[in-house]
Amino acid sequence: MATDSFRLTITEARELLRKRELSAVELTRACLDRIDAVEPLLNSFITVCADEALAQAREADRRLAKGGAPPLCGIPLAIKDIYATRGVRTTCASKILENFVPTYDATVIARLRAEGAVFVGKANLDEFAMGSSTENSAFGPTRNPYDTQRVAGGSSGGSAAAVAADQCLGSLGTDTGGSIREPASFCGVVGIKPTYSRVSRFGIVAYASSLDQVGPFGKTVRDCAIMLRSLAGADPADSTCSTRPVPDYEAALSGEVKGMRIGVPKEFFVEGMQADVENAVRAAIAHYQSAGARVVEVSLPHTQYAVAAYYLIATAEASANLERYDGIRYGVRVEADNLLDLYRKTRARGFGAEVKRRIMLGTFALSTGYYDAYYLKAQKVRTLIKRDFDQAFACCDLIATPTAPTTAFRLGEKMSDPLQMYLSDIFTISVNLAGLPGLALPCGYDAEGMPIGLQLIGPAFGEEIILRAGDAYERSGVLTRKPAVV
Ligand code: GLN
């Protein structure tokens, strides 16, 4: 089999593996070689698991030989380094967890392992998933496979870059305010943030628990549909996880958009947005119209408050979630004469600047006297944002927007200005606040060849409709996909 099998989609590889025209070991070796070749340019991974991956691949080949293997059997995947992986260190890109080796698997990792998936490595991210560029990683930034002077997006930048650069066939990320969709958009790949509660979060390091959600990256919408079906579903270990039956997402990909009502919110085409981005997104919407969908204008009037509300709610929850990193129970410890000093010194040394900023913001927002003015108010705004979406979905089936206001920016460009960085998520954050599913897929390239992302937002548990619409766009062939340059 050709040694460039790393370029295959999951859909294509699944076929070849089942027909035994390609072995899982060959495919895994091809990805590991590809990782060796391009990793020095990209830094998509914190840990590469070559030996473990080859052992998993050998096991997968045994299952494939018997026939009837599950869809992801033998498929090489990258895992954001925020998922607990038994026996493999899980750092969250933080010094405080530099040497933390979990003794158990996150539920979704256990599920994929049971399917025979192959884990090639743990992907880079912003420390504790706080950021939009993967520059907040204690292990150095990930670079964009379309231009290594630019960021891959974040916080799941390593997961997105690894798929874009064909270092794996698919990957897992997490999305609290845009961390799957924004890097997917910057790296020209597909990513879906499912409905809040659709996928178990047991074993995934918590950032902001009322917003965090797990999801896949793929080279195509169909690949994401395949992965999502394996990930989703009830988990007795996660009481926040829905018990709703999981549909066959792949079966929903009919290619048909006729009669679909696509809402376009006027508040999502803002001043200051890159012209190429607006043009590409509008062209994609026009394409849907010519394919028989109905385009309706909708309004999401509270969008302008989303970023402010998010940075109060997310930081408040983060300040509580990150209390556990105290030098006693996990990871790094800086010894001191007394307990309080040990906490102080450990946390001062272990956390990076952005994580400290978030903990301080969140602690402030929750403190007596400020709680009502900040946290409570933000929660009220959140309710209004959710209501906006409910009203919009009364007259449309899905909503189409840009994924991010710009294409990937240059490394260092926004590091000294946290507010500018926070604005990268202006179109994705309200989707998390409302708990809805959002799909990001490539819909064009800017004048400098950087990918542009279209975002399709569905009503709660409306994954099938956004996947169907995304797949239909992809299959229409209106967009000629450009490969990454690495
Ligand atoms: N960029 C946003 C933040 O820094 C979102 C991150 C995420 O979704 N994990 O909080």
Image: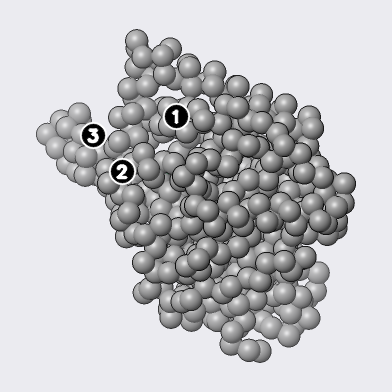
Q: Is residue 4 above or below residue 234?
A: below
Q: Nearer the viewer, mark 1 or mark 3?
A: 1
Residue 12 pos. (x, y %): 72, 74
Quickly name the residue at label 3.
Answer: 343
Snapshot quadrant of residue 110:
bottom right
Q: Is residue 87 above or below residue 270?
A: below
Instruction: Give, as a three-letter code, the residue at label 1.
Output: Ala
Residue plotted at (53% across, 40% down): 270
- Identify which residue, 185 or 313, lies in the foreground: 185
Say if residue 138 shows up in the picture: yes
Ligand 1 within 8 A of label 2's CB? no
Snapshot quadrant of residue 17:
bottom right
Quickly name the residue at label 2.
Answer: 417
Snapshot quadrant of residue 210:
top right
Q: Residue furthest top?
A: 369
Task: Give me the C-alpha separation between circle 3 and circle 2.
Answer: 29 Å
- Circle 1: is it few (<14), some (14-19), or many (20+) Cα within 10 Å? some
Ligand 1 within 8 A of label 3's CB? no
Ligand 1 within 8 A of label 1's CB? no
Quickly name the residue at label 1.
Answer: 308
Instruction: Give, as a three-letter code, the residue at label 2.
Output: Asp
Task: Give me the C-alpha separation between circle 1 and circle 2.
Answer: 16 Å
How many numbered discs, if any? 3
Q: Are marks 3 and 2 in contact (CB under 8 Å)?
A: no
Residue plotted at (39% across, 45% down): 421
Q: Residue furthest left?
A: 337
Residue plotted at (48% across, 57% down): 407
Q: Residue furthest right?
A: 259
Instruction: Give, as a three-letter code, the residue at label 3.
Output: Tyr
